[in-house]
Image (spheres, rainbow, N blue to C red):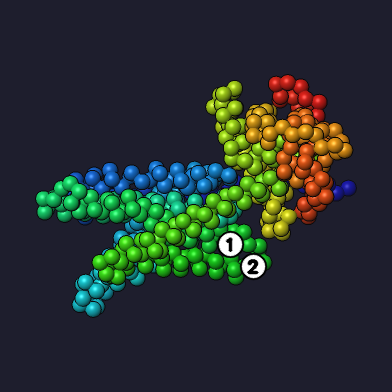
Amino acid sequence: MATCPPYPTNPPRPHWWQRAWVRYGAVATLLAISGLVILALVREQTGTHGFLVGLGLAVLPVPLLIAAFRWLDRVEPGPWRNLLFCFAWGACAAALIAIIANSFATRWIATATADPAGADTLGATVIAPVVEESAKAAAVLLVFLFRRRDFTGIVDGVVVAGVTATGFAFTENILYLGNAFGTDQLTGDSGFASVTAATFFVRVVMSPFAHPLFTVLTGIGFGIAALSTGRHRLRRALLPLAGLLLAMGMHALWNGSAAFGEYGFFAVYGAFMVPCFGLLTWLVIWTRQRELRTVRDELPAYVLAGWLAPAEPYALGSMHARRLARQYARRHAGKPAARAVAQYEAYATSLAFLRQRGRKGRAGADFAVRERELLGALWQRREVARPALDHAARATAPPPVAPWPGYGVPGYGVPGYGVPGAPGMYGAHIGCTTYGHAGPWAPALAATPAPAPTPYPMPARPPYPYAPYSQPHPHRP
């Protein structure tokens, strides 16, 4: 009788270049070398004193910009290593590419045309936008290709592109402010009439968002491409390219504003830059709210399957409730518990987005594996996170309302599924437009059809004796 060969217990080890620490080490080494080279170049052009002054002034807007992009990413926060890579790429690699390429192109044009002034103008309005936006877009492309799980939509594209551009603007501001300080040292100017003060006002006070605004257009193109299905390959390729071309065009208009006359800069700033900044800010905030609605709409499927508690979709779909949950966990169990709740919120959001992609036919071949990973991560943190989210749902619930007659036992229903009067832990005092509680919204919810199921089966919930709450509830899942 033939026997099957034994299953190999020790799979072949990957080659040394396939190991994670080798890849991370190579990227870190390249960025470090780029940083040292750009440091030497900037110091050579500005001098030691100019470099120190430029560094001290250029660092001022960086924390504010990073905090703003991190705030936009609070719904599904990406890992810090991605942001660190993007900032380092913009400050080191992209800045080095821009300095070398811009200098070479400007000198070549000046030699070919024998017109140094025209070469500087052409370099600023044509060469610099193309080179700089392409160098910054390379970081967005790398994250899009190699960190695809962390790049799922428009907000991710905006954050990655904005942080990359923040790093680039940081290095560029050191160069401009250092050169301005060197000019003041030669002319003896100081105070508000100095070139340093004027440069600081224009670049740091008036337009710290200029470079992030340009590159964000590229990020939006990549973000829309991330939302497209695999069938639309041409659109996935053209959307990032269109965003890059828009970024180059806006950058060229900004650099060329000085050629529009004495007040050309202020005209472009007031009539173009500020409205575009406001429009993009509105778009990103609207997208952020849409992501929260996705969380509220997709997670109830896991409530019905027993993976999540009934209160969790409501709490996870509100940034205020999320913050209350983290504060509650920190107050009662310390910082590790708050960190676990934050991780639970991030994993649940990723699960909602994954389920949405599956329902719309945009999920990849690893849908089931990724879903199991996220559910397992939630399951490991449930005992810490559920009491905190339960408290947040109670604290942010609508005001008490009288039970709606004729809709069963008053209590907490299943979000989005129109289950009227389902018994639950919250009793008769809660009514919410999103949930099927007994309340004045129950008739409309009762007629609301359930969301269309995805073609992927829901994983079975493992059996467990679950008792994480401080007081007993008869209707735990």
Please state if 424 lies on the left or on the right of 16 as rendered.
Answer: right
Q: Which mark is residue 225?
A: 1
Residue drawn at x 71%, y 58% as measured from the top left: 360
- Between 105 and 8, the residue placed more toward the observer is 105
Q: Is residue 445 visible?
A: yes
Measured as percent of width and height from the top left, residue 237 is found at 56, 67
Q: Which mark is residue 232?
A: 2
Residue drawn at x 53%, y 62% as measured from the top left: 221
Residue positioned most to the top: 471
Compared with residue 288, is residue 379 higher up or lower down, i.e. above or below? above
| The quadrant where residue 52 appears | top left
Q: Which mark is residue 88?
A: none
- Assign the C terminus to one quadrant of the image: top right
- Between 28 and 161, the residue placed more toward the observer is 161
Please state if 183 lies on the left or on the right of 306 as rendered.
Answer: left
Label 1, label 2: how far apart the Cα atoms are: 9 Å
Measured as percent of width and height from the top left, residue 248 is found at 41, 66
Crowding at mark 2 (Cα within 10 Å: few <14, some 14-19, many 20+):
few
Q: Callout 1, which amino acid?
A: Ala
Please state if 119 lies on the left or on the right of 364 as rendered.
Answer: left
Residue drawn at x 72%, y 40% as measured from the top left: 432
Q: Secondary structure at mark 2?
A: loop
Please state if 84 lies on the left or on the right of 326 as rendered.
Answer: left
- Between 436 and 238, the residue placed more toward the observer is 436
Measured as percent of width and height from the top left, residue 170 is found at 34, 50
Crowding at mark 1 (Cα within 10 Å: few <14, some 14-19, many 20+):
many
Residue drawn at x 46%, y 68% as measured from the top left: 245
Q: Secondary structure at mark 1?
A: helix
Disc on the earlier residue, 1 or 2: 1
Measured as percent of width and height from the top left, residue 64 is found at 40, 44
Q: Callout 2, which amino acid?
A: His
Residue positioned most to the bottom: 113
